[in-house]
Image (cartoon, helix red, strand yellow):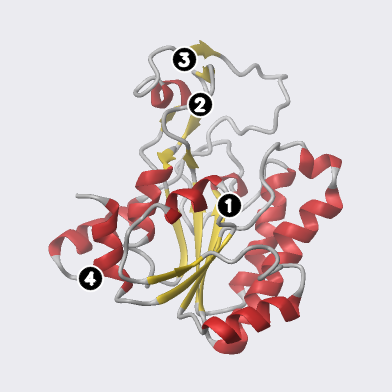
Amino acid sequence: MDISYWLVTLFYEKKIVITGGTGRFGTLLKQINTSNELFFPSKKKLNILNFKSIQKYLLKIKPDTLIHLAALSRPMDIHDKDIKKSIDLNIIGTANITKACEEKNIKLIYFSTNYVYPGTKGNYKETDSLLPVNSYAWSKLGGEASVQLYKNSLILRLCMTEKPFVHKVAFSNVVTSFMYHEDVIKMLFRVINKKGILNIGGSPMTVYNFAKKDNKNVAKIKLLKNQKIGMPINSSMNINKMKKIIKWYNSGII
């Protein structure tokens, strides 16, 4: 069943504003056919660092939901080299979006990361203690802090990547919960009416085992104990809540 089906059955012709539409995930969303109204404002029309710009755009569109994708992510070391930019885009920008949504009671869906968990033992539940593994994750947790204050919101802690696996090498001793962007889109529209915090990802496995499923040429390497690259050894998530939603959805309960 294609992605368009989930949009038609779950959006119920809502107006949805999506920030960060020029990114990898946003670009995929633009390719979907749906009877719902999806809006991908440019930075000129909606600047997340300009609160009045956000207010003006939301007043014009009057959306039911806002999906906040806009963020600074790669390269990871940019969050150490340009702290101001990281704070502005991932923390202050998210806080501005949250305040604007709260003013009009617009449902807010925020894309966070599994890297907010400590990344040592794996199988992290949504209620587990947090300890970001790098500066990028700290900036995303900073964004979470403002969203947590707004009750009409959903925080998605995601572990996703492009398909096929784009890197030439993959760690054989690093465990994660990767899910391809296309599959995250399907999940997104199953959980769009939920609130709170939800882990979204795939079954725990090493990065190498995940990568080789669709890229047979990927080479196996190991992360050394003294190797500092800001990557946790086991950032896998407990996805039982997500699985329950899938089960309910398939049974027709939701």
Which of these two is toward me, 50 or 190? Answer: 50
Residue lying at 44% horizontally and 72% vertically, measured from the top left: 195
Which x, y percent locates residue 37?
A: 40, 72
Q: Secondary structure at mark 1?
A: loop
Quadrant location of residue 204? Answer: top left
**In the figure, is residue 64 to the left or right of 129?**
left
Inter-mark Cα distance, 3 to 1? 28 Å
Inter-mark Cα distance, 3 to 4? 40 Å
* Three-letter code for the amino acid on which mark 1 is drawn: Thr
Q: Around disc 1, counting alpha carbons within 10 Å, would you say few (fewer than 14), some (14 to 19), or many (20 or more)?
A: some
Is the residue 159 above or below the residue 104 in the image?
above
Quadrant location of residue 251? Answer: bottom left
Q: Secondary structure at mark 3?
A: loop
Q: Sequence order check: which comes first, mark 2 or mark 4?
A: 2
Nearest to viewer (mark 1 / mark 2): 1
Q: Secondary structure at mark 4?
A: loop
* Three-letter code for the amino acid on which mark 3 is drawn: Val
According to the image, label 3 marks what residue?
A: 218
Which x, y percent locates residue 165?
A: 46, 27
